[in-house]
Amino acid sequence: MLDSRPPMQQQATKLAILISGHGSNMASLAAACRDEHWAAQVVVVISSRSDAPGIVRARELGLPVEVLASSAFASREAFDAALIERLDALEVDLVVLAGFMRILTDGFVQHFAGRLVNIHPSLLPAFTGLDTHASALAAGVRVHGASVHLVTPELDHGPLIAQAVVPVLDADDAATLAARVLRLEHILLPRAVRWMVEGRVQVNQGRVRVEGIDDAQRLIFDNALPADFRYCAAGASAGQA
């Protein structure tokens, strides 16, 4: 059994948040860590783009910010090696990908195995990769959402920690659907990362169990979903435990 708890230590868990864009999930995660008094500290926010709006947002929150521009490196391997070196120098315990638009090499993923968390804007394993909201609309699905998972070498296929579900409305376009999903992402990511910080997350044969947390609590539902759907979905999740 793989235990994905951060290493036991006397000091607070050191968090690194990696971004490439607006950083709204980074901001929600940092705010939850501060306001809920986690035994954790955001020791760095690293952006892969020098022009990412999230850099300004992180600085406004008083967080340490660094830019490691992917454009400055000749290969993915070189970029990932530099990123590993910096994170190791900071003695980071847990790395959170919060809108980090890079496909990481197997070497990077293996280096941080069990300590690398990603949020993806779909109900995985559906709609991996980019343009998930447009893909969901094109497929005609009636529900969509977001997933927080442990990262493995296979893109967007790591063990699922928690998911959020929203309805797909007839009037939706990719922008309106994305906005509805993002509102729940801001709840979902802090919840899942807190469980990681508290050492509750364990993986056995590719499936996550969260100590002290009912499986139904690992699902977040948009209020626009019918109550009977939420009840049945939560029950089905609990029944699969």
Image: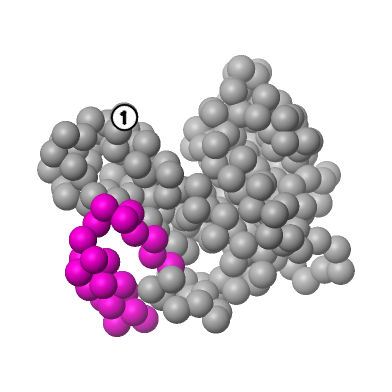
Residue depicted at x 54% and y 28%:
21
Residue where numbered disc 1 is placed: 175
Tell which residue pokes out farthest to the right in this image.
Answer: 10
Q: Position of residue 168 (x, y in %)?
A: 21, 45
Q: Which of the colour schemes (rainbow, by chain, secondary structure, one colour) is used?
A: one colour
Picture quarter with the C terminus: bottom left
Quadrant location, the N terminus: bottom right
Foreground residue among 39 and 78: 39
- Residue shown at the point (31%, 72%) measured from the top left: 234
Query: Image height check: is 45 above or below 231?
Result: above
Please give left or right for residue 136 compared with residue 186 in the image. left
Residue 71, picture quadrant:
top right
Q: Is residue 61 magenta?
A: no
Residue visible at 65% across and 43% down in the picture: 17
Question: Residue 74: x percent and y percent?
Answer: 61, 21
Quarter of the figure with residue 195:
bottom right
Q: Position of residue 119 (x, y in %)?
A: 48, 48
Can you see residue 74?
Answer: no
Percent of width and height locating residue 10 = 86, 69
Magenta residues span 218-241
**Is residue 37 shown to the viewer in this render?**
yes
Left or right, 233 with reference to 195: left
Q: How many marks?
A: 1
| Kind of residue indicated by mark 1 | Ala
- Helix, strand or loop at label 1? It is helix
Name the residue at 78% across, 71% down: 8
Which one is nearer the viewer's eye here, 223 or 230? 223
For the residue pair 78 and 195, the one nearer the viewer reads as 195
Q: Is residue 198 left or right of residue 24?
A: right
